[in-house]
Amino acid sequence: MKTLGSGVAAGAALGGGLPLGPASAEAAGAQPERPGTPGRLDLSDFQPRSMLHVKETRVERPRFPVIDVHTHLTFSDRAQGGEQVKVLIAAKEAVAVMDRKGIAAMVNLTGGTADVLPQTLAAFDKAVPGRFLSCVEPAYDRIRESRFAQQQADAIAAAHRAGARGLKVLKTLGLYLREQVGEGPLVKVDDRRFDPMWEAAAAASLPVFIHTADPEAFFLPIDRFNERWDELGHHPDWSFYGRDFPSFKELMEARDRVFARHPKTTFVALHVGHDAENLAFVSESLDRFPNMLVELGARVGELGRQPRTARRFFERYQDRILFGTDAVPPPEGESTPQQVFKDELYEIYYRFLETEDEYFDYAPAKVPPQGRWRIYGIGLPEGILKKVYHDNAVRLLGLSS
Ligand SMILES: [Zn+2]
């Protein structure tokens, strides 16, 4: 999940759009000088319509029941003093979408720290048993306390007893958390103070859902060469270029040291192992770390623009890929159309996985929100679909199938 910001919906006008076509003094959006001659056009106004006549399949229901292991139905905020759980959607409203879209269960990753997790469990896991599984999060604001390391381990054990089904670690670790919480040097992903926490997760058989780094383009300048220029224009706070941020490579190396040091802990590396742009690297990681799995959240845009490589990846790692969307209910989710929790989002995932349709939108938005391309389905066979949609999650979460 990306930081929830006040970003405008994709498709809205961006300031300072790049002009296309021959330079002229005309204002953006002005009419051509004469028919057949391009005028100037602001990039934010460019919404080309494909003239391809190709098969369009609507997949309203998945081939097998789905377990979505990456959703955000609640958020909590401790930084504002006094942690509160914010419920983004009523459980019964979420269930209506789930029933329409063939979703058996959803993992709600951001359930809050052990202190407030009971509020989340009451709103979801206990409100509609069997349909929601909530995770606990570390209490980062206690990092300055001398007993922090053991305290976090104890909190995981307590959360497990209360009903947590996993531990969620946001990209906060590595990119936001500092020694004095909001100030001072960044705390590294492989900081030793978290070792007892990783071990406590293993002891409680709780998988760790970890998000490290972000798309590679977020670590590059926001200039005309940046393929996620639109997205960073809407969410400039997602840029990790410059300042004191570690490089993408440094973050991956720190993550690898954690995976290596805690072989009994199961890590679900979110967003296709944090590097959907580089499936060769993700494959190497999966080969190196038997305790690692991946999930798809908010990355069908990346997978679907490399359909042949993606299909081979699914064939090879069919037992270690989990279905996830990074869904955030509206209205919060509207600022990230590739994650908005609604019927259309799931239909795109199903179409990508099940069909060989060509050149379609990866998000329900007028303008592709992550980068200006479209995607191709990978037409997975039933055996792989069943594992990715359902069976791998059942095994990971210890559910009865
Ligand atoms: Zn997420």
Image (cartoon, rainbow, N blue to C red):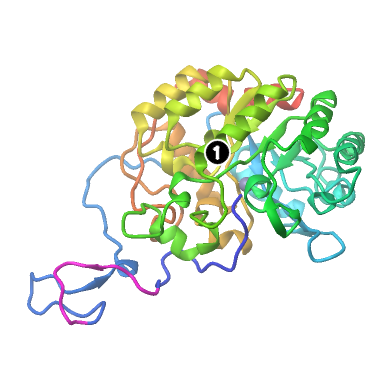
Q: Position of residue 106 (x, y in %)?
A: 69, 40
Judged left or right of residue 56, residue 314 is right
Q: Residues within 10 Å of mark 1 (few under 14, many from 20)?
A: some
Q: Which residues are magenta?
A: 15-26
Q: Nearer the viewer, residue 347 or 334?
A: 334
Q: Is residue 305 left or right of residue 76?
A: left
Query: Between 161 and 260, which is closer to the camera in this rendering?
Result: 260
Compared across the picture, whether 230 is left or right of 244 comes to left
Does residue 59 appear in this view?
no
- Circle 1 sits on which residue? 250
Q: From the top left corner, tell me how far across and down residue 5 is, in percent.
A: 60, 64
User: Residue at 70% across / 52% down in the picture?
Assistant: 177
| Viewer-side residue, 60 vs 108 | 108
Does the magenta segment cover residue 24? yes
Q: Amino acid at mark 1?
A: Glu
Q: Is residue 221 magenta?
A: no
Q: Is mark 1 within 8 Å of ligand 1?
A: no
At horizontal 73% and vertical 30% (from top left) the residue drawn is 207
Seen at 43% across and 56% down, the residue is: 369
Residue 291 image-quadrant placement: top right
Q: Quadrant of residue 294?
A: top right
Residue 10 visible (yes or no): yes
The quadrant of the picture occupied by the C terminus is top right
Image height of 191 relative to 48, above or below: above
- Classify residue 178 as left or right of residue 119: left
Question: Residue 111 at x, y = what percent?
Answer: 78, 48
Give the residue drawn at x 53%, y 44%.
346
Q: Give the overall secondary structure of the magenta segment.
A: loop
Q: Secondary structure at mark 1?
A: helix
The x, y position of residue 109, in whole percent, is 71, 44
Q: Quadrant of residue 164?
A: top right
